[in-house]
Amino acid sequence: MELETDLEAVLEEVVRRWPVPYAALAAIRRVDGSSVTTTAGDVHRVLPVASVTKLVASYATLVAVEEETVSLAEETRWPGVTLRHLLSHAGGIAPDRPEAIRPPGVRRIYSNAGFETVAEHVATRAGLPFGTYLTEAVLEPLEMQTARLAGTAAAGLECSLADLCGFAGELLDPTLVSTTTLTDATSVQFPSLRGVLPGFGMQDPNPWGLGFEIRATKSPHWTGTGNSAATFGHFGQSGSFLWVDPAVSAALAVVTDRPFGNWARRAWPELSDRVLDHL
């Protein structure tokens, strides 16, 4: 109880101090087999979460893999470019247009267009619009009641922090996919690839899982210096993020209404370290 009170005080202080009109924060921990969530701010306000969408879209794709609707080894519209390549930004696809600019597996090129191709591929195989598949595969089972895919699979999710907490809990203790599948998704795909981490510059290497960015030894980075190398997650240009650190069985989720910028580069790692200090 004392830990809960101290952590809540930290989160509430951050909400008051951050230079944003609105922020809601949540720390989620696994304690004795259950999830314990500490929050600050209005957790029910619905906002776009930009590229945090990729985590949920990836998870829907993992469900499709387990249902044998698709295979990670399947080629997509480009010869030799598989779903595994696209989910891990290793397909050589241009950032914002569906065009192959490098051979697959040689460079980490962060590609929204690649993610949109994943969604198109899953939708074709499933015979459903991707938004419908994502809703039925992830949002409804996790009771993410305010969440909806209002745009692309790369950046179009809108949801509340409360719903993001529900998804974080799933990542800490998976029920929709097997532990083996989630472990694969949060492990480095195509190791040693270098590339740009948006907002933080060139990283060599730039490890990525199946839709999940992996912290490893990246510097600078949006998580804290105290986060383990196994930390995975994503941030969005909307000023939101979600990370999960398996080393401490904990997650941190943030939703704001101020776009990502220098304020976030400073504030997010500091918040992460303060939360980790309390865990």
Image (cartoon, rainbow, N blue to C red):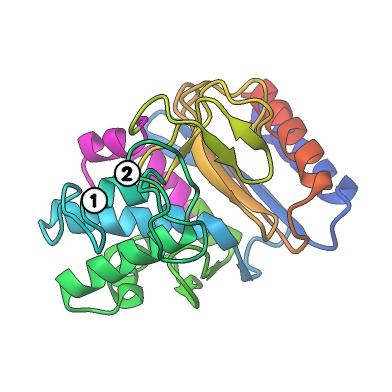
Q: Residue at x 35, y 43 (%)?
A: 210
Q: Residue at x 43, y 42 (%)?
A: 212
Residue 58 spot, x, y in % from top left = 36, 54
Q: Are circles 2 and 1 on residues that touch, CB within 8 Å?
A: yes
Number of disc labels: 2
Dot 2, crowdedness within 10 Å: few (<14), some or many (≥20)? many
Residue 202 located within the stretch drawn in magenta: no
Assign a secondary structure to mark 1. Answer: loop
Image: magenta residue range: 166-188
Residue 186 located within the stretch drawn in magenta: yes
Residue 242 spot, x, y in % from top left = 56, 46
Asked if 71 appears above or below 140 in the picture, the reply is above
Mark carried by residue 82: 1
Q: Quadrant of the N terminus?
A: top right
Assign a secondary structure to mark 2. Answer: loop
**Amino acid at circle 1:** Thr
Q: Residue at x 61, y 24 (%)?
A: 279
Asked if 194 appears above or below 253 in the picture, the reply is above
Residue 154 spot, x, y in % from top left = 47, 63
Q: Which quadrant of the figure has residue 199?
A: top right
In the image, taking residue 43 as reference, residue 81 lies left or right, namely left
Mark carried by residue 268: none
Mark 2 or mark 1: which comes first in sequence?
1
| Residue 176 at least partly seen | no
Residue 125 spot, x, y in % from top left = 16, 70
Asked if 194 appears above or below 142 in the picture, the reply is above
- The residue to which callout 2 is attached is 104
Asked if 105 appears above or below 146 in the picture, the reply is above
Give the Cα separation between the discs numbered 2 and 1: 9 Å
